[in-house]
Amino acid sequence: MALLQRDTRRYEFQNQIETIDLGLSLEDVTAMRLESEYQHHPKGTKAVMMDNLRENGATEAEVAFMFRDFDRLRSTRRVELNAMTSPQMIALIEKKLRAHGVKKIVPNKILLAKVYTEFEKGRRLQEMVNKLDDIKMSGFKAPTNLESSVRKYLKEHPDVRWDVALEEIVTKSAPQNRKKRTK
């Protein structure tokens, strides 16, 4: 059914918007043999509800499907999207998009070149990061007084997490920083 495409007594659209119905039709339900479920209607008049469906684009076959058991159960039938498997859902959406001529977008040459350049920059950066894995750490040992250094730092900076304290200790003990402190 085509909903949200016309003014109602409660809402008047300010803009003309083209709507494309990608919804599950009775034809889809029948073709996929999907199971329906019931929705109880304790209030409301059958004729009014049926007229509302027609006004919103339901076919006579859809109205008949929905109201088949209404007189006996006071319920309409409906089919939820989760009645489909994931592959069925994807196939349905792709079929509806194709039927409406929807295609993938390819940006203009300028944007393509700009994004291409950024991807290449990222690729080159990743190459450099991969080379960092080759940094030799043989012979390196953490200081033996590390726990006491972290505790001391946290005592002086109680609002800091232990890993931030540890990072600060590593930064201060870097060779270039040691030279600055001794001068």
Image (spheres, rainbow, N blue to C red):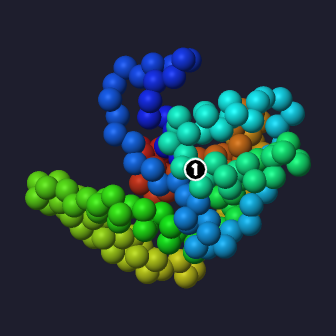
Residue density around tag 1, few if under 14, some if 14–19, many if 20 or more, within 10 Å = few
| Residue at screen point 49% across, 34% down | 4
* Left or right of 127 on screen, residue 42: right
Asked whether 8 or 83 is in front, the reply is 8
Q: Residue 29: x and y, percent?
A: 62, 65
Asked whether 108 or 10 is in front, the reply is 10
Give the number of marks: 1
Q: Residue 60: x and y, percent?
A: 57, 50
Which image quarter is the C terminus in? top left
Q: Residue 161: x and y, percent?
A: 71, 43
Asked if residue 152 shows in the view, the reply is yes
Residue that label 1 marks: 60
* Left or right of 168 on screen, residue 100: left
Q: Amino acid at mark 1?
A: Glu
Asked whether 107 or 4 is in front, the reply is 4
Q: Say above or below: 98 vs 15.
A: below
Q: Quadrant of residue 27?
A: bottom right
Q: Say above or below: 169 vs 55.
A: below
| Residue at screen point 75% across, 35% down | 46
Q: Residue 30: x and y, percent?
A: 62, 69
Asked if residue 148 shows in the view, the reply is no
Provide the secondary structure element on which disc 1 rests. helix
| Residue at screen point 87% across, 33% down | 42
Check the image and name the residue furthest to the left.
Answer: 109
Q: Quadrant of residue 132?
A: bottom left
